Amino acid sequence: MFDDFMVNTWIAATLVAGVAGVVGFFVVIRGASFAAHALPLSAFPGAAAANLVGVDQLIGVLAFSGFGVAGISQLGRRGRRDVATALSLVMLLGLGALFLSRTTEYFQAIYALLFGEVLGVGAQDLAPLAALSAVSIALTLALFRPLLLSSVSPELAETISVSPRVMEVLFLVVVALATAVALPVVGALLVFSLMVGPASAARTLTSRPLAGLFISAAISIVTVWASIALSFASDWPIGFFVGALSALGYLAGRTWAWVEIQGLSQFRRSR
Amino acid sequence: MLTRSEVLAVRQASVSLSGHPILKDIDFALNAGEFCGLIGANGSGKTTLLRTVLGFVMPTSGSVTMEAGGRASIGYVPQKFILDPYMPMRARDLVALGLDGNRLGVPLPSRGRRRKVDEMLEAVEATPFADQRIGSLSGGQQQRVLIAHALIRRPRLLLLDEPLANLDIRSVAGIVALLRRVSRELQTTVLLSAHDMNPLLSVMDRIVYLAHGRAATGAIDAVVRTEVLSRLYGYHIDVVRVHGRVLVVAAEGEGDAQTAIQRDPVHVAQVP
Ligand SMILES: Nc1ncnc2c1ncn2[C@@H]1O[C@H](COP(=O)(O)OP(=O)(O)OP(=O)(O)O)[C@@H](O)[C@H]1O
Ligand SMILES: [Mg+2]
């Protein structure tokens, strides 16, 4: 499990999990789960397109995430974000269907894009992965306060000259970067669970924003480590464990929050 | 132009939202340290006027002039919004964001920052719940935290949009007394919107009374009068004073007035 070629896997998985946990914190407190679900799915055809054109997959994924961001933020300008998100998703998935029908890829490769291929990370994949991870974490930490305030109230942010529109676009850019990092490793469908599960659990465990962000990253990393180990031991696909453990974390978080709120209201009543 | 003592001057300002005229020829000025009530029924344009002062909305004609500093010297408490009960944020975190929420980077522990936040929490009497989640606080407690958030930059002008709505009588009195006190201590001009003027009668230096998109402005006694408000509404209304309270009552049988009364919970609520 700790052979030479597995070392790459552990490093890549840790990077991906860290990024998903950090970015996921804002996905959850901004209530942007749908965008975080749609962006990886709309980026996935990008990998197919890249294969077709003959460029690196990562470039295709980045380009399509970019289209997704542009679509969601431009269409969402007037009107509801969820409608804009759904529209962008449908358009990009349509393109994806077209590209996939043109490629000669094996079913296996497409399956890997959807569900991930943690055990297939090569040494040459690590450098771009590390660079992208560094950029998206740095960007999230740099924007920490403006993002936080605009999540609480766009109007409060605007009052101290933080444009909620600019913050929304930058936030989507960060999600797109995180998608590009995570998609080749954990797959389009599981990026989402890694972004939402650990962060939802984290926000119930602490009432401090910065601590919440780090706890989210920690839970995400532990989830991925455990999934690799379990997948190695059981020979079941890693995606199953990532999805199941994230959901478990989320449920545990919700239950904990529920218990806490119940306890609080009883405490209030008893006074 | 502003005279020397003026902090804000709204001159003949008209505002339209998506092509619909909402406010027309609004004209008033506030002096340093003044407490002004912006009174009007639901939909009369209170929020629109405050957003115009903030520069979020541009007047179609007329002007809004703020003392040097512009928006940077305005604090704003928006009309009630929902604070997510799961948001991992304590009252003190929200107050600190008022100070440096527009800065880049994560907040590093700093003694100066901590002291400013503690002082502000103390000033609004929010110290006892400073470490609780904002979403778990009561309406009155949240209002205090939002006031601290808005005041921590020591703005020259504090705008509050219906900060007294949904509060019980005791909390209303508490918030009004708090605002009067901090506005004196910090020399902050306060412009506060409300649909009921009564809790504010003892503290207002000036009133801007909105109806049908127009405003009557001046000292309370000059504005809250039968003939002035009748002219503003465009039909006869009576201003009645009983037990130190002011009731604005439409005349019986006034067809137009009946609809005004229905739109205007102030009037209905005030009739004993
Ligand atoms: N974007 C918009 N486009 C067109 N009309 C609008 C828009 N926003 C608000 N209005 C209208 O402007 C009028 C004033 O609205 P505003 O929110 O300023 O009133 P208000 O006095 O704050 O009301 P409330 O007491 O309910 O908060 C209302 O009639 C409203 O329907
Ligand atoms: Mg309003």
Image (spheres, grey):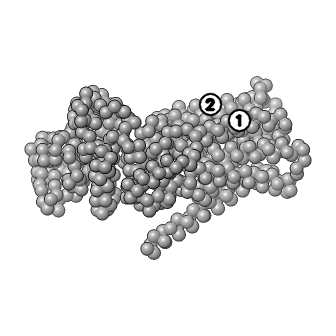
Query: Local crowd at mark 2 within 10 Å, few (<14), some, or many (≥20)?
Result: many
In the image, farthest residue toward the front: B111
Front residue (pair B104, A65) = B104
* B127 vs B69: above or below: below
- Image side of residue B50 versus residue A246, left or right: left
Q: Secondary structure at mark 1?
A: helix
**Residue A130, how many percent across, how many down?**
75, 37
In the image, farthest residue toward the right: A3
* B145 vs B19: above or below: below
**Residue A169, how many percent across, how many down?**
55, 35
Q: Give the amino acid at mark 1.
A: Leu
Front residue (pair B67, A224) = B67
**Residue B104, how many percent across, how many down?**
55, 38
Q: Name the residue located 12 percent from the left edge and 40 percent from the top edge.
A: B231
- Chain letter for mark 1: A
Q: Give the amino acid at mark 2.
A: Phe
- Chain letter for mark 2: A
Identify the residue under disc 1.
A132
Label placed on residue A67: 2
In the image, farthest residue toward the left: B227
Is residue B215 visible in the rendered structure shown here? yes
For residue B123, which quarter of the picture? bottom left
For residue B7, which quarter of the picture? top left
Label placed on residue A228: none
